[in-house]
Amino acid sequence: MYQGVYWHLLNCLDQFRRKGEHQTEVTTLPVQATDLEPTLETNQLYQQLLSVLSPNERRYLTAAYVRGLNVSEMAREFEVSRKTIYWWKAGVAQKAKIIWHKG
């Protein structure tokens, strides 16, 4: 179940990014009428994830999946090292696993 929800979340974020609806902070995922129930569940998990992420981890998540920036672009924009970006990414992944295993 974890992997299915995880991939669904990534697909929703990629679709959102491709539509060009850039936001500074993403608080909800786009809702598609064809699979409303899985999207609602994913939205709940995403909201839980946002609530436990640090501000920098939220910045990473938004930059990576909504704005489509790569590690080098993020490091340049946030004026931090690439290694720092990788730490933020690892923090997001670790917290996501914890939340999705509970759900």
Image (tube, rainbow, N blue to C red):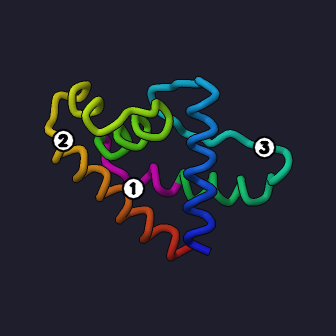
N-term mark: 3 or 2 = 3
Q: Left or right: where does residue 53 sit relative to residue 25?
A: left
Q: Residue at x 63, y 39 (%)?
A: 15
Q: Percent position (x, y) of residue 32?
A: 78, 43
Distance from Cα at disc 1 to Cα at disc 2: 23 Å
**Numbered badge on residue 71:** none
Give the residue displayed 58% in from the left and 59% down from the top.
7
The disc labelled 1 sits on which kind of residue?
Answer: Val
Residue 69 placement (x, y as % from top left): 38, 32
Q: Name the amino acid type tagged 2.
A: Arg
Principal secondary structure, stretch drawn in magenta:
helix
Kindly give the residue lying farthest to the right in the view shown: 34
Residue labelled with disc 2: 82
Q: Mark 3 or mark 1, which is nearer the start of the sequence?
A: 3
Q: Closer to the camera, 55 or 75?
A: 75
Q: CA distance from mark 3 to mark 2?
A: 35 Å
